[in-house]
Amino acid sequence: MTENKDTDTGRSTAYRAAYFNTLTHYLDTHVNAVRNISTVLAIAGFAFAARGVRLFNKFYSVSDIPPQFIQKNVRLQGKVVHVKDQHLQVEHIPILYLRIPFLMKKREGSIGVHLAGVKFEEGGVDWLKENVHTKGVFFTMLQVNSRQQLDCVVTARRPGWRGLFSSMCLNEELVRQGLGKVAPIEGMQVGTTYVKLTKKLLRAELVAERKRRGVWTEPTVFERYKARYDNAKEDMMMAVQRRKKAVVEAGRILASPASLLKSLWTFASKKFRRE
């Protein structure tokens, strides 16, 4: 019995050794195929893992964005497709923008992005159209406001050659140019993020006010005197019109005896009532 066991063990060991040698030889001769398979499996695993954390997901509206993204102030990338009265319409661009059919959804839509803490003034919309329309931006989400738009801190490349080396915060830049004013962020809790952003915007507004930009521009001496002259001229024209109207009314009364008697009776009645 012992000999049979030893014989079986020897055969098993020899079989395993032969199998291992065959497998090793196959791997050595097909090393490129094995590497390619490993690469494909790794890419597939990464793709599904990335889809799990929404690296491929494109958001078409505010409701598509996970609430935890907004709570953690995640920064997203997009392209400005429209500049509205008080906000931007941004088409979201995923972190990994791959045109893979089974990962893409056939939908259209853009996200309303409001520059947090900023109220657009005259010229603000035109400036944004000139500098960021159809261009890429990054927007850090702070909250969803009452208009179902995102209150965000938006950054973009500077116009011209400076954009090769630096970017600008649109919230600050619009205020610094005097094309926007600092406004409270309704519904947002006063915390570190709120205080830091408000301080930056107030400093930018102070710069615009000191340099008399945009809405802070003061009229020159000539413009002030011209405005006074125009007002005085308008007052004089109104006085002339009132005088002409009074003369016409007096002529109409004198031309008709009945109107004259009626006017005298009205005058006398008012006088007696006072007495």
Image (tube, helix red, strand yellow):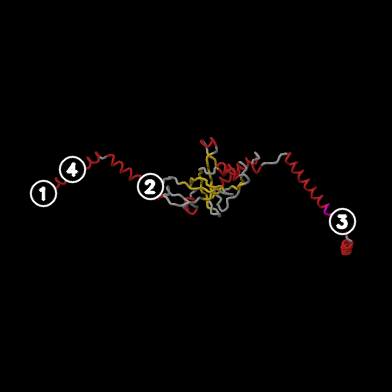
Residues under labels 3 and 4: Cα distance?
132 Å
Q: Nearer the viewer, residue 235 or 246?
A: 246
Residues under labels 1 and 3: Cα distance?
147 Å
In the rendered structure, which disc, 1 or 4, sits on the residue that comes first in sequence? 1
Report helix, strand or loop for mark 1. Answer: helix
Residues under labels 2 and 4: Cα distance?
38 Å
Q: Nearer the viewer, residue 247 or 115?
A: 247
Dominant secondary structure of the magenta stretch?
helix
Look at mark 4 in the image and give the residue it sits on. Answer: 18
What amino acid is labelled 4 in the image?
Ala
Give residue 82's position: percent from left, percent from top.
Answer: 54, 47
Report helix, strand or loop for mark 2. Answer: helix
The residue under the point 17% across, 45% down is: 15
The residue under the point 74% across, 43% down is: 227
**Residue 203 visible here:** no
Question: Which mark, residue 4?
Answer: 1
The residue under the point 70% across, 41% down is: 219
Q: Is residue 51 left or right of residue 216?
A: left
What amino acid is labelled 1 in the image?
Asn
Look at mark 3 in the image and give the residue it sits on. Answer: 251
